[in-house]
Amino acid sequence: MTTTLSRPVTMSKPALAALSVLALATGALESVVTPTLPLLQRELDMTPAEGALLSIVLLITGALVTPLAGKFGDRYGGKRVMIRLMAVVGAGGVVSALAPSMPVLLVGQLLQGAMVGALPLSFILVRKHLPVDRSKVAIGVVSGMFVAGGMAGMLSAGPVAEQLSRHWMFALPTIVVIGATLLVHRLMPHDPPDRSDDAGIDWPGLVLLSGVLVTLMLLLALAPRLTSQPLVLVALVVLLVAMVAGWVAVERRAVSPMVDLRMLARPEVWKSCVLTFMICVGTAWASHLVPQLFAVSGDGYGFGAGATQIGLFMLPGTLAASLAGPIAGIGARRFGSRAVVVVGAVMMASSLVVLANVHTEVWHLVVGKALIALANSLCITAMVSGAATSVDRADTGIATSLVLVTRVLGLAVGMQVSGAILTAGTPVGSKVPVESAFVTGFLIAGAVTALALLFTRTTSEGVKR
């Protein structure tokens, strides 16, 4: 039941700026572990298995929190839920910054995973306080800042950890998160809830979805090692299928499901989710393969670049990603979300195929990665904007959270599969993959991205409400 009774207060430019800075800081805080994982494993005496767990836990908690954040934002108001959620994220950042050991850092990352829920809450606030045409641009700005923050975190984490300490790579973005949250609290207009229901939390659905995500990540991470143990591999697959079936059954019967499958069944939402997943798989492939190709020093290929050089090589991609959000928002308003997605998907697929065939110079990879980052941001922003404006305003949080969950899953799956391809392409006794492994990875990623174009003809352009 909707409860909006009065005309919403328009969001000011300073309030939108505070929301954008918050997106930038959370994006940076989300991404600092990946480029510094070897350093963390060395300093905290972590095994490779513990390092993998550290990388996965933030993705899993983010995927779990995001639909809850969207649902609670629709139910209780986006600003109210966001402030409380960011308090958890800030606490997680402080714990991570002060962590003396791996278990404590794991707890910090568990708390930090709540940050992904800030995006659907931001979109709820944008939809409530801006008209549809301006909200598309604003969603593009916030999405672009989050992507830019993620890239900035990946670029700066290594130098900060090496020049200062690993503690500061968590502390600096956490300080910005806390400051931006205070500004949002002060500047953002209060938003009344769009839904009024007293149904409790869907704990069975939450537990089963947690099991699904953990099992999926384990299956992807262990699959290359389990080829010699087919019974274990089959057992994990059966367990995953059983958990998915159980979760679907529970969600269909729940009074207030964690993930509204009826919303997911809407064409404008599930097609956005499929597109987002496929685009993010291709993006994750490139995000993993390009730095590896920069760093590898193989026989006749690779560049043997260090962490600082790789950061500089990736800088154009950071700039492209940050600019693409607003561009996608403007494009979606002027030409429709579908047109923006088509342009982005064609750009990404073409770049991946070209990289598979042309990667003998540094600038080949720099330009290719920048185009892929630009295409990813265009597509994801258009998908989120299209989903947000294709449903009732009261359903904004639920619809956008579903798209963002598939983003997380697409990135996780892409990273794991690209890593498996490189592992399979590494000769016995060597630590360097053969060049054909990179070529295969780029080609498969390009094919997956090209398949996304099959869904664009029937994607929604959004509605004006």
Image (cartoon, rainbow, N blue to C red):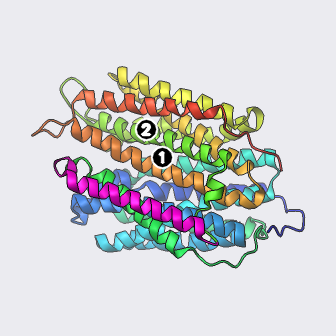
The correct choice, above or below, for 73 with respect to 338 in the image is: below
Residue at image coords 46%, 51%: 409
The residue beneath circle 2 is 314
Viewer can see residue 326 = yes
Instruction: Please tell me whether mark 1 sits on a helix, a strand or a loop.
Output: helix
- Is 270 left, or right, of 137 in this rendering? left
Please give the range of residues in magenta: 226-255
Answer whether residue 241 is magenta in the image.
yes
Percent coordinates x, y for residue 213 in the rendering: 42, 60
Percent coordinates x, y for residue 199 in the rendering: 66, 77
The residue beneath circle 1 is 151
Q: Residues within 10 Å of mark 2 (few under 14, many from 20)?
A: many
Percent coordinates x, y for residue 296 in the rendering: 25, 35
- Is 455 left, or right, of 236 in this rendering? right
Viewer can see residue 165 = no
Instruction: Please tell me whether mark 2 sits on a helix, a strand or a loop.
Output: helix
| Residues tagged 1 and 2 counted as in contact (Cβ below 8 A) | yes
Residue at image coords 29%, 72%: 101
The correct choice, above or below, for 174 with respect to 143 in the image is: below
Percent coordinates x, y for residue 92 in the rendering: 46, 71
Residue type, numbered disc 2? Met
The correct choice, above or below, for 351 with respect to 465 in the image is: above
Is most of the magenta stretch helix, strand or loop?
A: helix
Q: CA distance from mark 1 to mark 2?
A: 8 Å
